[in-house]
Amino acid sequence: MKRAYAPAEADDGVRILIDRLWPRGVSKARAALDDWIKDLAPSNALRTWFAHDPARWAEFQRRYRAELRDQPEALDRLRALAGEQVVTLVYGARDEQHNDAVVLRAVLLGER
């Protein structure tokens, strides 16, 4: 996992943006993305409700995991890619502990 504002590095492997919105102020060249999988991002309603409020973190995780269950093809595609090479989940949030990439990573790894 890496913030979209951090510089891309050679050991990032395949860089995939997993947010619904493009990170503000980041050019396509600077982002150095290989893919953008919007289908795996939280819905606009969930993203707006959460508003990166740590007090809503537990409920955000529950709701986002429920949304991810409706995207099995996109999850399988990402899992298959990660099984073949290094994948970096790129996200725009400032909070590195309470964001969609943290939840998505846990889901991909089969963590509860």
Image: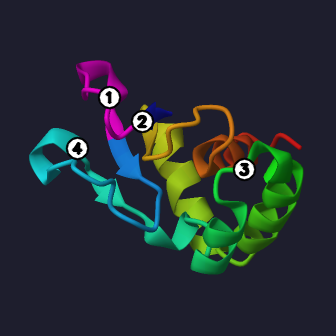
The spot of residue 12 in percent (x, y) is 34, 27
Task: Choose mark 1 or mark 3, whichever is in front.
Answer: 3
Give the residue type that dot 2 points to: Arg
**Residue on which the image places disc 4:** 31
* Element type where label 4 sits in the image: helix
Along the line of sight, the residue nearer the viewer: 22 or 112: 22
Q: Amino acid at mark 3?
A: Asp
The residue at the point 89 percent across, 44 percent down is: 112
* Residue at 39% in and 53% down: 17
Res 6 label: 1
Q: CA distance from mark 2 to mark 4?
A: 10 Å
Q: How many marks?
A: 4
Marks 2,1: beta carbons within 8 A: yes
12 shown above or below 73: above
Left or right: residue 18 versus residue 23 is right
Which mark, by number, is residue 3?
2
- Which of marks 4 and 3 precedes in the sequence? 4
Kindly indicate whether the residue at mark 1 contacts the one at mark 4 (C-beta within 8 angstroms): no
- The reply to whether residue 32 is in sight is no
